[in-house]
Amino acid sequence: MSGAPSSDPAAREVLEQAKKRGWVTIFQRAEQIKPCPIGQGGGCCRICGMGPCRLVGEVQTGVCGATESTVVARNFARMVAAGAAAHSDHGRALALLLQAVARGEIPHHRIADERKLRWVAELMGVPAEGRPVEQVAAEVASRAIEDFTRQRGELTYISRAPKKRQEVWRAAGVVPRGIDREISEMLHRTTIGTDQEAEHLLDQAVRVALGSGWGGSMLATDLSDILFGTPSPLPAEANLGVLRAEAVNVVVHGHEPLLPEALVQVLAEPELQAEARAAGAEGINLVGMCCTGNEALMRRGIPSAGNFLHQELAILTGAVDAMVVDVQCILEALAALAKQFHTRLITTSPKARITGAEHLELSEERALEVAREIIRRAIAAYRERREEVAIPPHKAALIAGFSHEYIEYMLGGRYRRSFWPLVDNIINGRLLGVAAVVGCNNPRIPQDSSSLYAIKELIANNVLVVTTGCTAVAAGKHGLLDPAMLELAGPGLREVCEAVGIGPVLHLGSCVDNSRVLTVLSALVATGGLGSDISDLPAVGLCPEWMSEKALEIGTYFAGSGATVLFGGVSPVSGSRAVVEIMTECWQARYGGRLEFVGDPAVLVSKAIETLHRKRQALGIDVQRQRVLFDMDSRRQLA
Ligand code: NFS
């Protein structure tokens, strides 16, 4: 990769402008602030008032005597707990929303997918047959809420994992009890002078993460589907080019699906449209960003303006009239930046405010009212536009909306939903395996570069790729979610995709929707033919450009679920060789999965492909196919 900050031409164009105008973005701040190498590798302990203790050189322990492995494991475990708290709190919000809807407290809201509700009820052991939908919904909501607060016993959805996997967890003592209990216990155990054995701490990190993956996140996915509809494929577009100079542009950014759903509902109201036209605009253009963007994209085909590193860039186009945010991954810098433009930055969550932003609190009952008010504020801002509008013309067509239900249906047909065609094509060698390429942007890595490189190499080597979060948006912006991209796929993958009628890269949703990947993996095991546990499957997880604590939590639950997980970028545990060994060798022995940090994207991909071959060998299905190696020419063509 050259020294360019982004592999996205839209980003490069806006950054070029920003440089001329003296606007500062995350890209410059990342250059100015050099990360502390000790903290970066997890070796700085600041959990009490005797430190911070930086374990470096001669300093082998903290003031309390905490060793390198304890400090590094503790720091990692706390990051996992924070990530799990974020994703699970998102799930909790939906459980409470479902409860309110079931009680009739939100008249404008209906259950969108009754079939999914009844399926979830069955999984939870809630009797559904012949009962009114509200009753079933109320009980499902209570069961979901119980999963957060349970003190003893096992998380409900543990039963969705393969039997063998459940036994692995029971043997290791890591079956989550209640989602909140595990997070809270993790915080307790990482306080000064409590749990002081790295392996023991990291087992609890696995337990916390499983509580999110098979609990908070999986509930978030299921309950969103019930409340707003289960996604199925639809066409859309992605990148800054989805902003429209002549329209009132509202960017909805953050994570929770409630607001974009409300905005979609009111968007077409004649009064609002008339008000927009009276302000001189051609209409109202709603676009998404980050994971809220993914939610709206998956269910409503709302275009995505970009991923994590695009949030400031969108404002810099001068075309954003309102940027509405709720929780997670929202840059505080947006507040100061929006002030330099006419853009209204509006916070909507009772959990998150930003100094300098307008706050307009969203509650379930008032969702539509708030949505209208947001649009009105955007229209008012449109009248105040003062900077020249310069929208880079880049956008790509894509197909999004692959729920696991749809994948099963698409593979097997309407009347015989089945994962067998996928399993069969893995066994016969047309497909080498399946990879989930997920995660963030990180300004320390040229935007999207590692993710795109990994995806392209994998599909060229006949690996079916599923993607979520900001990586999914990266894939979308660069055309990789367009089925026409089949030309980049290896011959086996191409054949399978053509037969089924899909592209080689499937967008599965936002980051909580990584739980859809867990569901697909469990379904592959249940189909038979590829072993008896997730750890047997020729499947890998890659997170090439991680940045958030949530990414670490996702990686940990996949590793704890038996998958080989490879992260790019820097390692937050490089400060302790012992911790690195626990998360690779020990976890491999205990969970059949591992979490490894690999800086170099080429090594990352090689390791992923090696893993798939190794799994195939163990299953006795490995036919040696030549690895497609990219020479410089083909790389340039891809770029
Ligand atoms: Ni995931 Fe979504 Fe993006 Fe990373 Fe942030 S938006 S929850 S954490 S940056 S993928």
Image: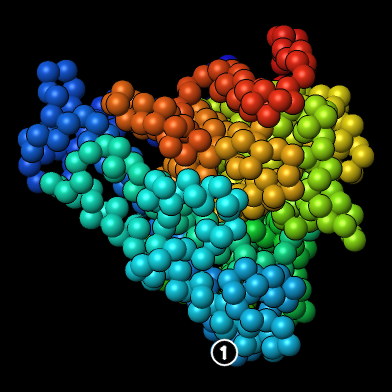
Q: What amino acid type should be assigned to the residue bearing mark 1?
A: Arg
Q: Residue at x 57, y 21 (%)?
A: 607
Q: Residue at x 11, y 39 (%)?
A: 51
Element under label 1? loop
Label 1: how many Cα within 10 Å (few below 14, some 14–19, many 20+)? some
Spot occupied by residue 87 in the image (x, y as percentages of width and height): 48, 57
Spot occupied by residue 411 in the image (x, y as percentages of width and height): 84, 48
Q: Quadrant of the C terminus?
A: top right
Compared across the picture, whether 550 is left or right of 293 comes to left
Is residue 560 depicted above or below 363 in this figure? above
What residue is pinned by disc 1?
103
- In this picture the colour scheme is rainbow
Image-quadrant location for residue 228: bottom right
Q: Does residue 349 appear in this view? A: no
Q: Quadrant of the N terminus?
A: top right
Using the image as rendered, state which of residue 18 and residue 362 is in the foreground.
362
